[in-house]
Amino acid sequence: KANVGTWVDKQRTKRKKRLRDGIEEIPMEEKRLDEIGLLWEVRQITSEEYINEIIKYKEEKERKHPGRPWDGNVPNKYSVTLDDGTKANVGGWVDRQRTKRRKRLRDGKEEIPMEEKRLDKIGLLWKVR
C-alpha cells in the first residue's frame, strides 16, 4: 500500500541531506516536486495563532448575536486560512487541547499549560456534549 505523505517526507529528508552535504546535483524526484510547487519547509502554526483565531471566532459569534454570550464551543471542523495562505484547522487544534487537558487531569498533574490558561480566560467549553 503506497502512502504519499510518507514518500514526500522521505523526499524532504533526502533534500535536507543533499543540501547539508553540499551536493549540487538535484535528483529527478526533487525537480518534479519543485515543478508542482511542493513546500519543502512545512510551516508550523503557533499556539498563539490558533488562540488569536479562537478569539476572532468568539468575537464574530458575539457580534452576530448581540447580548448573547459565546457558548464556548469551537466546532471540530472549523478551519481558517491565515494571512500567508496557510490553512489552520482551529477546531482540530482545540480538540487536541481538550485531550491534553483530560490527560493532565487524569494524571493528576497540577501545572497548567499556557494554552489551557489562555483558553480558560477566553471561555472555551472544555466538555462538549
Image (cartoon, rainbow, N blue to C red):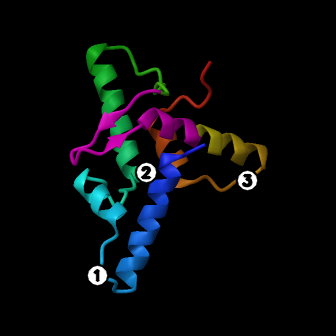
Residue 62: x %, y % from top left: 32, 21
Q: Are marks 1 and 2 in contact (CB under 8 Å)?
A: no
Q: Secondary structure at mark 2?
A: helix
Crowding at dot 3, Cα within 10 Å, few <14 / some 14-19 / many 20+, comes out as few
The part of the image, by quadrant, that contains residue 21 is bottom left
**For this view, does 75 lie left or right of residue 85?**
right
Looking at the rendered structure, the kind of residue marked 1 is: Glu
The magenta stretch spans residue 21: no
Residue tagged by mark 2? 47
Q: Secondary structure at mark 3?
A: loop
Q: Disc 3 versus disc 1: distance between alpha carbons?
A: 50 Å
Residue tagged by mark 1? 24
Question: In the current view of this chain or complex, which residue is farthest to the bottom?
Answer: 22
Looking at the rendered structure, the kind of residue marked 2 is: Ser
Query: Over which residues does the magenta segment extend?
Result: 77-97
- Which circle marks residue 82 in the picture? none
For the C terminus, which image quadrant?
top right
Name the N-terminal-most of marks 1 and 2. Answer: 1
Q: Disc 3 versus disc 2: distance between alpha carbons?
A: 21 Å
